[in-house]
Amino acid sequence: MLKPRAILSAAAKYVRKNPDEVVRVAVNAAGLKFGVPIAALRYLAEQMAGGKKAPKDVRISTAPPAIRLSAIVDAMGTAVRASAAIRIDEVDLNPQSMRMTVRLRDVKLELVGESDSPVATLIKSGALDLSKPGNLVKFIPRRPPMIVEAEGDRVVIDLLKVPKIADNPRIRRALQVVTPVLGVGAIETDRDHLYVRLRASPLGLLEAASAIRGR
């Protein structure tokens, strides 16, 4: 479980060890660019580990502009290390959708230990075409509704297809007020950080103001 006090303590220790981070944040903020240290993502992954169904041994690194994730997961009773370089290619936020185009590359599935399960047999056979993971996602039975498109190495996700998000009035209001003015220009990495670059649209101020008055 994430504990706010522990998170603040870890953040303070990181800043003491990396004092230049404060300057980096200020400079980037002036250009509407906001970064999260990869070390912070690793810390959060460690704090969230331990759940019965949670991925194990999560590893996070970068392959700029992508982020590389690796973890041991339970695939129908078979322990598998899954890894991929993940790049957010496009983000489109508006009151009607929260769409992200994700590119999955260098996807790998490796067995953890010996197994003769159907999943293990499939992995050993090399029959899975992991160069085009979107094609596999497209044919998943009972595919999650938030996955709206999948083809090749491309998967498109719309978070507003998730009922808990779509039915949240605060999220809906935030989209109406914020998205006319601010959009996401890019999500990318360098060696040590994950960055979100925002895009300002002053022409949307009237629409945002109208949404505020409508409240």
Image (tube, rainbow, N blue to C red):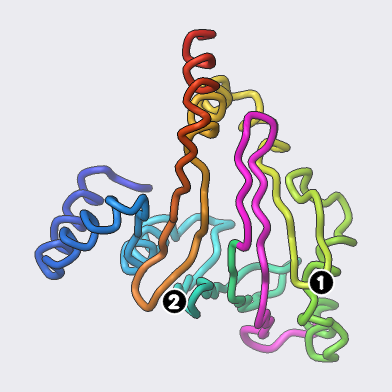
- Toward the front, the furthest residue is 203
The residue that mark 2 highlights is 61
Image label count: 2
Q: Nearer the viewer, mark 2 or mark 1?
A: 1
Q: Residue 155 location, x and y as percent?
A: 74, 60
In the rendered image, which quarter is residue 22 located in? bottom left
Q: Residue 80 location, x and y as percent?
A: 65, 77
Q: Is residue 104 magenta?
A: yes
Q: Is residue 164 above or below residue 67?
A: above
Check disc 2 and report its element: helix, strand or loop.
Answer: strand
Q: Which mark is residue 135?
A: none
Q: Residues within 10 Å of mark 2 (few under 14, many from 20)?
A: many
From mark 2 to mark 1, how far is it between C-alphas? 24 Å
Residue at the location (55% across, 30% down)?
175
In the displayed structure, does residue 78 sit left or right of residue 26? right
Q: Is residue 138 magenta?
A: no
Check disc 1 and report its element: helix, strand or loop.
Answer: loop
The residue that mark 1 highlights is 152
Q: Amino acid at mark 2?
A: Ser
The part of the chain drawn in magenta is 89-116
In the displayed structure, does residue 178 sit left or right of residue 151? left
Residue at the location (67% across, 77% down)?
105
Q: Residue 40 location, x and y as percent?
A: 32, 62
Q: Amino acid at mark 1?
A: Gly
> Relative to the observer, which residue lies in front, 147 or 24?
24
In the rendered image, which quarter is residue 193 located in? bottom left
